[in-house]
C-alpha cells in the first residue's frame, strides 16, 4: 500500500473514530502537510523502496494510560524523588534557581493539592501523608488542545497529548486552559539552567518562549520501551503503564482489581492517569 | 516634470545601495565551502548526496512531522543491515560529528541560520 | 489627508515628542525582553498571563465602546452624534492596534505569530479573536477614512460604505464576546467560568469607551477649540451611566453566586481580590487596594455624572472628572483584577502573587503611549478636516 493511500485511510479512520465529524476533517485538512512536504514524501518513498515492511502498523485506537500506586511510594519514600530525577534527566528538564522561571514535568505534591475535589473532612493520617506524583494527565478530552491556536499541542495516535515545540508560538493559552496546572513555559533559555555536560544526549532541550510538559515518554514508547518513570520503579509496580483501550492489557487488569481515582473527574477531561490511594 | 533631477539622483542612490553587496565583493560569490566528510567511514547517506544537499531541510521537516506528529517512527534507511531512525541528533550527527564543520560551513556561506540548534544539541555542545 | 497631522502648534509637537520618548524607552525594554525572554516579566508558570494580556482585554472593550456612537447615529439617526462618531471610530483603530501590540509583546515566539493563520484551528477561541479583531480594525479604518474623505469633499459618503458601517456593529459586539470566551470556556478556572463574563465585558466596554471619548472631547475643547456639542456629550453621559451600573450589577451577581452558594471555588478569587485570601497562615492581598479603588472610583464617578448638581454645572470639569473616574475604575476592574485574579488560586490550590517588574511596566506604558500617539494624530486629521469645512 503506498504511503499516500495509507495516510488517507489513517486520516479517514481517525476522523471517524474521533467522532468529531466535520470539525475533525477540517482540522486534518487544515493541518495537513504543505506541497513541499508531500513532494519530499514522494522522494522518501522512492528511496525507501521495499523497506515498507519495517514500518509499524498504524496505531489507531491506542490510548496509553498510567496507574500510580501511592502505597508503593509510601513504602519506599525515596522512590518519588528517584522518579522525578530520572524524568528530569531523560528529558533535559532545567532546574532554575528562581521559582518564577521554574519548569516541571513530574513532581511530588500534597494530597490536597493534587486531589482538590476529594477534600473530605477528617482525613485519615495515611491519606494526608501521601506525597502524590503529578504530571500531565494526557486527557482523553484535553482542554489545552482545544485552546491551542496552532495545534502545537495535539493528541497523537497513541492518545498522548504531545507538544510540537517547532510550532508553538508561546501564547500560553494552553497553560490557562489546563485545569491541573501541569504546563510550564520557557521564560528564558533553558540551557541557562542545564549542565550541558550531563544532559541526555539523545533528547533535545527546549528553546526560549515555548510551552512544555510531560510527554508520556512518547520518544521511548514509540520505540516499544516503557516510560522512564515506569522503568525506574523496577519490579515494584508502583507505576503501571499500558494501553487503556486493550481490555487484556496489564493496566486494565490493575484498574479492574483496584479502586482508583482521577484528578478533577467532574471537569469531563477524562484523565489517563489513575491513582491507587 | 518637477524635480526630475532629484528623483533620478535618488533612484541612482537606491540602486547603488541595494546592489552594494555585489560591488563590495567584486561580483565574486567567494569560494564554495567544502564540508567535512562523514566520520566512521560511512559510505552511504540516508538519501543520495545531491538530494541531501538541496533538500535536507524538507527531509528533516518530514521526519519531524512523521516522528512527532504522526507517530511514524519507521526507519529512515537501512545500510548493511543497520537501521537508522529518523533523527537529527541520533542519526545525522552520528556520522557528521561536527556541526561546525558540517552544518555551519554551508549555512554561514548561504547566510541562513536555521533554528534547529536552539533545541537540538550539537555534538560540540555536549561532551 | 495625512498632511493635516503635520501642521500643529508647539504643544502638539511637545506632546508627540513626549509620547515618542516613552515609546522609545519601551522599545529598548522590548529589545531586552526579546533577547532575554519573558523572564523579564513578573509572570510565572502559576500566573502565566500578566499586564500585557490584561491590558489587551481592557482595550478590546475600549475599541468596542466606539459602537455606542456608531449605533445611535447610523441606526437611530441620532444626528447629534454626527460630529463625534468619527472620534469613536478612530479611537477604536488606536485601541485595536494597542491590542495587537500587546499580544505580540506577550508571545514567547513572536516571529511565529503567523502560525495562527498557517495552522488555523477553528476550535481555538484565539483564532476567532484574531479574525474579529483584524476584521473590526479593517472596518474602522475603511469606514472612518471613507466618511471623512466624503466630508472633506462636502459630499455624501458613497452608499456602499453603509454596508460596512452596519457590519461594524455586530463586529464590535463580537470582538468583546470572543475575548470573553477566551476566559469563560476554560474548565477549572472558576472565576472565569461564568456565562456572565461576556455581558459583563460588554457593559464595562460601553461605559469605559464612551467615558474616554467624553474626556478626550472635553480636552479637545480646551486645546483644539473643538466643540463636540453639549447635547451629544449629555447623551453619551446617559449611556455611560446605564452601562456602568449594569457592569457593577453583574459584578454584584458574581458575589451573590459565590457567597450565597458558599462553594469555595466560586468564592476564592473574589475573596482574594477584595478581602485577601488566607492560605497556610498567610493572607495574600496584593490586589485588594486596586479592587477597592475600582469600587471607590465607581461611586465617585457615578455621583459626578448622575447628580444634577454636577451634571448640569456650567463647569464641565465635573463631567470630565466623573468620566475619568469611571474609565479608571473599570480599568482597575478589567485591566487589573479580572485577568490577574483568575490565576488565584492555582489549579493545585496554591497562591502565587504577581508583581510586574520595571521592564514589563515600561513596555506596557510604551504601548499606551503608542495608542495615545495614534489617537492624537488621527484626531488631528479629523479635526483638521472639520476646521477646513467650517473655514
Image: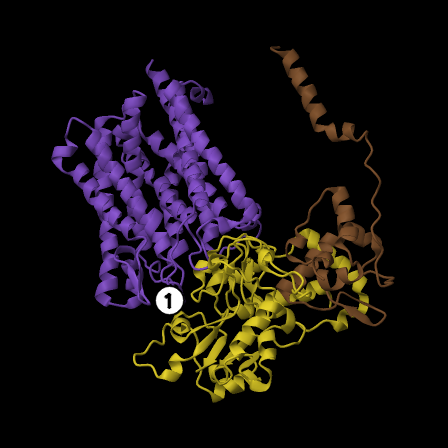
Chain colours: A yellow, B brown, C purple
**Which residue is found at the position 22% from the left and 44% from the top?**
C298
The C terminus of chain C: image quadrant: top left
What x and y, as percent, mark residue C187? 40, 64
**Which residue is found at the position 43% from the left and 47% from the top?**
C357
Q: Is residue A7 left or right of residue A145?
A: right
Q: Nearer the viewer, residue C185 or B122?
A: B122
- Badge 1 local density, few (<14 within 10 Å), some, or many (20+)? some
Q: Nearer the viewer, residue C158 or B116?
A: B116
Asked if residue B26 can be seen in this view, the reply is yes
- The mark total stands at 1
**Which residue is found at the position 51% from the left and 86% from the top?**
A254
The residue most toward the bottom is A257
Q: Is residue C140 above or below residue A186?
A: above
Q: Is residue A241 above or below residue C253?
A: below
Q: Is residue C239 above or below residue C194?
A: above
What x and y, as percent, mark residue C84? 31, 29
The residue most toward the left is C309
What x and y, as percent, mark residue C343? 38, 58
The N terminus of chain C: image quadrant: top left
Q: Which residue is mark 1?
A: C349
Asked if residue C136 can be seen in this view, the reply is no
Q: Nearer the viewer, residue A192 or C90?
A: A192
What x and y, as percent, mark residue C168? 39, 39
Q: Quadrant of residue C255?
A: bottom left
**Which residue is found at the position 72% from the left and 52% from the top?**
B57
Secondary structure beneath dot 1 equals: loop
Q: Is residue B7 left or right of residue B86?
A: left
Q: Chain of mark 1?
A: C
Amino acid at each position: 500500500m503506498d504511503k499516500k493511500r495509507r495516510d488517507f485511510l489513517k486520516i479517514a479512520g481517525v476522523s471517524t473514530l474521533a467522532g468529531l465529524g466535520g470539525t475533525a476533517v477540517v482540522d486534518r485538512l487544515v493541518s495537513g502537510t504543505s506541497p513541499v512536504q508531500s513532494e519530499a514524501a514522494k522522494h522518501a518513498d522512492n528511496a525507501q523502496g521495499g523497506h515498507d515492511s519495517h514500518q509499524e502498523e498504524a496505531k489507531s485506537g491506542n490510548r496509553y494510560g498510567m496507574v500510580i500506586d501511592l502505597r508503593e511510594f509510601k513504602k519506599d519514600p525515596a522512590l518519588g524523588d528517584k522518579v522525578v530525577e530520572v524524568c528530569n534527566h531523560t528529558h533535559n528538564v532545567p532546574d532554575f534557581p528562581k521559582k518564577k522561571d521554574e519548569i516541571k514535568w513530574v513532581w511530588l505534591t500534597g494530597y490536597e493539592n493534587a486531589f482538590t475535589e476529594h477534600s473530605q473532612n477528617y482525613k485519615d493520617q495515611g491519606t494526608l501523608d501521601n506525597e502524590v506524583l503529578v504530571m500531565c494527565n494526557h486527557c482523553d478530552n484535553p482542554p489545552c488542545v482545544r485552546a491551542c491556536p496552532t495545534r502545537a499541542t495535539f493528541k497523537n495516535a497513541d492518545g498522548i497529548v504531545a507538544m510540537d515545540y517547532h510550532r508553538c508560538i508561546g501564547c500560553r493559552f494552553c497553560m490557562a486552559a489546563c485545569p491541573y496546572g501541569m504546563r510550564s513555559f520557557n521564560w528564558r533559555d533553558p540551557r541557562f539552567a542545564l549542565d550541558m555536560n550531563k544532559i541526555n544526549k539523545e533528547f533535545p532541550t527546549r528553546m526560549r518562549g515555548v510551552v512544555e510538559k510531560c510527554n508520556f515518554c512518547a520518544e521511548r514508547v514509540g520505540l516499544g520501551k516503557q516510560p522512564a518513570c515506569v522503568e525506574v520503579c523496577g519490579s515494584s509496580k508502583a507505576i503501571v503503564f499500558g494501553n487503556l483501550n486493550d481490555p487484556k492489557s496489564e493496566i486494565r487488569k490493575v484498574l479492574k482489581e483496584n479502586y482508583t481515582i482521577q484528578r478533577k473527574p467532574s471537569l469531563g477531561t477524562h484523565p489517563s492517569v489513575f491513582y491507587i490511594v | 516634470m518637477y524635480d526630475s533631477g532629484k528623483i533620478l539622483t535618488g533612484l541612482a542612490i537606491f540602486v547603488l545601495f541595494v546592489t552594494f553587496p555585489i560591488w563590495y565583493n567584486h561580483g565574486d560569490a567567494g569560494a564554495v565551502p567544502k564540508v567535512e566528510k562523514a566520520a566512521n567511514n560511512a559510505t552511504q547517506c540516508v538519501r543520495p548526496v545531491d538530494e541531501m544537499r538541496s533538500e535536507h531541510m524538507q527531509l528533516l521537516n518530514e521526519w519531524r512531522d512523521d516522528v512527532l506528529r504522526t507517530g511514524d517512527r519507521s526507519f529512515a534507511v537501512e545500510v548493511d543491515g543497520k537501521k537508522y531512525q529518523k533523527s537529527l541528533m541520533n542519526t545525522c550527527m552520528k556520522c557528521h560529528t561536527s556541526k561546525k564543520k558540517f552544518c555551519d560551513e554551508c549555512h554561514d556561506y548561504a547566510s541562513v541560520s536555521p533554528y534547529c540548534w536552539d533545541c537540538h544539541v550539537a555534538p560540540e555542545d555536549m561532551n | 489627508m495625512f498632511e493635516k497631522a503635520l501642521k500643529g502648534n508647539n504643544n502638539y509637537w511637545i506632546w508627540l515628542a513626549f509620547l515618542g520618548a516613552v515609546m522609545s524607552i519601551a522599545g529598548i525594554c522590548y529589545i531586552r525582553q526579546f533577547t532575554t525572554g519573558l523572564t523579564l516579566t513578573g509572570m510565572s508558570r502559576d500566573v502565566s498571563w500578566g499586564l500585557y494580556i490584561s491590558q489587551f482585554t481592557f482595550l478590546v472593550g475600549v475599541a468596542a465602546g466606539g459602537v455606542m456612537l456608531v449605533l445611535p447615529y447610523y441606526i437611530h439617526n441620532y444626528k447629534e452624534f454626527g460630529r463625534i462618531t468619527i472620534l469613536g471610530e478612530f479611537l477604536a483603530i488606536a485601541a485595536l492596534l494597542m491590542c495587537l501590540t500587546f499580544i505580540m509583546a506577550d508571545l514567547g515566539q513572536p516571529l511565529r505569530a503567523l502560525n495562527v493563520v498557517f495552522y488555523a484551528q477553528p476550535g481555538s477561541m484565539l483564532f476567532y479573536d484574531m479574525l474579529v479583531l483584524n476584521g473590526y480594525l479593517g472596518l474602522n479604518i475603511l469606514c472612518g477614512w471613507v466618511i471623512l474623505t466624503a466630508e472633506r469633499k462636502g459630499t455624501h459618503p458613497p452608499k456602499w460604505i453603509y454596508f460596512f458601517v452596519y457590519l461594524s456593529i455586530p463586529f464590535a459586539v463580537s470582538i468583546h464576546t470572543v475575548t470573553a470566551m477566551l476566559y469563560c470556556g476554560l474548565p477549572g478556572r472558576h472565576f472565569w467560568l461564568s456565562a456572565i463574563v461576556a455581558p459583563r465585558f460588554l457593559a464595562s466596554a460601553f461605559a469605559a469607551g464612551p467615558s474616554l471619548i467624553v474626556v478626550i472631547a472635553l480636552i479637545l475643547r480646551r486645546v483644539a477649540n473643538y466643540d463636540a456639542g453639549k447635547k451629544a456629550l449629555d447623551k453619551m453621559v446617559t449611556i455611560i451611566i446605564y452601562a456602568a451600573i449594569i457592569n457593577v450589577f453583574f459584578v454584584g451577581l458574581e458575589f451573590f453566586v459565590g457567597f450565597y452558594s458558599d462553594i469555595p471555588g466560586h468564592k476564592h478569587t473574589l475573596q482574594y481580590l477584595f478581602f485577601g485570601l488566607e492560605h497556610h497562615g498567610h493572607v495574600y492581598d496584593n490586589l485588594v487596594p486596586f479592587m477597592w479603588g475600582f469600587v471607590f472610583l465607581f461611586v465617585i464617578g457615578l455621583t459626578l455624572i448622575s447628580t444634577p448638581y454636577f451634571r448640569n454645572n456650567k463647569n464641565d470639569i465635573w463631567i470630565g472628572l466623573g468620566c475619568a473616574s469611571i474609565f479608571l475604575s473599570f480599568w482597575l476592574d478589567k485591566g487589573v483584577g479580572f485577568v490577574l485574579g483568575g490565576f488565584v488560586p492555582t489549579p493545585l490550590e496554591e497562591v502565587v502573587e504577581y508583581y510586574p517588574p520595571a521592564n514589563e511596566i515600561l513596555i506596557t506604558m510604551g504601548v499606551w503611549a503608542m495608542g495615545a500617539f495614534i489617537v492624537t494624530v488621527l484626531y488631528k486629521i479629523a479635526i483638521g478636516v472639520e476646521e477646513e469645512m467650517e473655514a
